Each structure stands twice: as structure tokens, then as C-alpha cells.
Amino acid sequence: MGNVENYNINKEWETSTSTTTNSTTTTTNSASASSTTSAPSRVFGFFKGLVGNKELTEADLTPILDKIHNHLIEKNVAEDISKKCCDSICASLVGKTNPSFTSVASTVHAAMEEALTRILTPKRAYDILSDVRATNKQQRRPYSIVFVGVNGVGKSTSLSKVCFWLLQSGLKVLIAGCDTFRAGAVEQLRVHARCLKVDLFEQGYGKDASQVAGFALSHAKAEGYDVVLIDTAGRMDNNEPLMRSLAKLVGENKPDLILFVGEALVGNSGVHQLTEFNASLRKYQHGTENPRIVDGIFLTKFDTIDEKVGAALSMTYTTGQPILFVGVGQTYTDLRRLNVTSVVKSLLK
């Protein structure tokens, strides 16, 4: 797929702090926040003099954890989630003996680093390429991914980045235009499809989105496609008709993966959006014993947030769903896996 046009959606992404990447995108590339040293950072510097070999009390920990709590909020972590993390660390350390020649701050830092890493690390391994090939071989059908989210977060662009990555992996991809609500949605996808040199399945506007998705999946199976990427209408979580439509699409077509596309810089509102999407999917999938909800998160504009990476923690902590991709620019190659270690270091820097 070397001749695929690297279409720039708005403008070339330019930043003096960007990292050099390969010309083709793979999921082993990582979205990295600013690098830091392994030593306790400036948040803990004031407390380094409080050394160890004593049983830790709440009084020892509170001043340090209060400072961390405020620091995490500055990093765009939701306030209640920052407090829960700090309370959890306090409960886990009270009564334990601090090692000799170790400051209380160092002990707290290590415990917080471990806790944040645990929160951000997916509970199960996701290998989408292996899942695609297994589905193709064992079930003899295309693997399907549905992209959902509110208006204006970049679902179509994010879908196109995933499409490019799949093409670079040698897979045959069909894009399904199931946003039958927003004027211009199909035309936008057509531009991406033309630049990526892939086929677009669409039936215009005003149609039942679930039916369009079903027809697209049938067409893809008949024509030997490996993956179908399903674009859906952007909708606010309180728009009941559109949420019912989305739940119907998910319940009837049973996609293999549901990705929630959200912005990395939105903070608490992103957590609310994702929570409400899951609630609506559960509520409106009638006749389903185990309704499907969001499987993973695609965070856009990750390159614009500097070290304020807290939305990643907030979304994952609240829902338990992992961040599978992050967008770091305007071109199709600007797709990364979340680098958990780098994010944790940025949160504690």
C-alpha cells in the first residue's frame, strides 16, 4: 500500500517536540508524553527529608497525598478520581513499615506509580490484527469495528487512521457510511476512501443506520473483505432517538469491537460522555441478555495536551475500558498505542 496518499485532513502537524516515526504506522509505536527521570519528581521534593524505618501513619501520608491530589487535578485528572486514587494509596500504606533510608515521599511515589500503571494497563491483551485474521479464518467473515462518540471529536478521521494502519498490515478494508443523519458525512468519508484507495459502502441519508451496516457486512462477506469499519453519527449522550439508533445498530449487527472516540483534552466531560454512552447502550438494546457496551477508547488530539494527560486516567478508571489508540496529529500515520509508562511518568512529573 506504499502508494496510498498520506492525506492531511487540515494541515501538516508541526511541532518542535514531535518524535520521529517510521513511514508506516504500527501499533508498537507509542504515544509518549515528555520524558522524565525515575527519581521522585518535584511534587515529592519537599518531603524527601521524611526518612523511613518507621510504621507509617495517616498523619505521615496526608500532607504528601494532599499535594499529589492537587497535582493530579492540574494534570486534568477528574477531582473525584484523584481523591479516590490518593485515598486508596493511603489505605494501602497505613500501618506498613517504611524501609530504612527511604523517604516517605519515595514510598508514596512508588505506590502511586504502581497504582496508576495498574489502572491504565488493559485487563486483557488486545491484538486486533490477530483477532481479525482469526475471525476471517475460523468464521469466514469480515471483522467489524464500530466507531461511536459525540459530535466533532474526529470519528471519521480516527476511522481513517485505523484504516490506513490495517492497509499497511495487508488487510482488505471496507468503510461503511452509517452516519445517515448528518449532512456531508458520506461526502467526508468519500474523500478519505479516495485518498486511502479503499471502497466505501453507503446508501445516502435518511436510511436506517442498522440496516445500512447489515447490508455493508453482507457485501463485505460476499466480496472477501477482511475488515469493515463502520462510521456512525456523532450524537450527544442525551439524544434519545440517536442513542436508540446506535443501540439498535450494535444489537442487530454484533460488531467485534466498539471504539469510543473522545478528545484527550476534555477531562470530566469525556468521562461523563463515555459513561452515558454505555448506560444508553445497556438501556436500549432490547431483548439482549448481555447488552454490548464500549470495548475500548480512541483518544484524539493527544499531541495537543503536553503533560496534561489526566483524561486518559479518568476515562479508564471510571469505565474500566482500555485506551487502544491515540491520535497524535493530522495525517493518517499519526496513530499510536498508549505508552502507559510514559503517561504515568507525566502524571507524576
Image: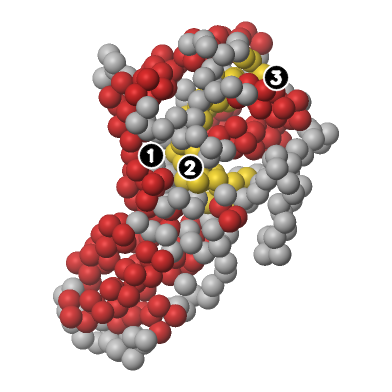
Q: In the image, which disc is placed on residue 199?
A: 3
Q: Is residue 13 left or right of residue 321?
A: right
Tell me the residue that label 1 is attached to: 274
Q: Secondary structure at mark 3?
A: strand
Name the residue rendered at 37%, 20% in the picture.
241
Note whether residue 58 is visible.
yes
Tell me the residue that label 2 is attached to: 262
Comparing 59 with 69, the one in front is: 69
Tag count in the figure?
A: 3
Mark-to-mark CA distance, 2 and 1: 8 Å
Residue 180 position, x and y percent, is 54, 17
Q: Amino acid at mark 2?
A: Gly
* In this view, the mark in front (2 or 3): 2
Q: Is residue 1 left or right of residue 175?
A: right
Mark-to-mark CA distance, 2 and 3: 26 Å
Q: Secondary structure at mark 2?
A: strand
Residue 212 position, x and y percent, is 53, 12
Mark with earlier residue (1, 3): 3
Comparing 109 with 70, the one in front is: 70
Q: Residues within 10 Å of mark 2 (few under 14, many from 20)?
A: many
Q: Amino acid at mark 3?
A: Asp
Residue 38 position, x and y percent, is 49, 75
**Outermost residue toward the right in this view:** 3
* In this view, the mark in front (1 or 3): 1
**Does 115 appear above or below 265?**
below
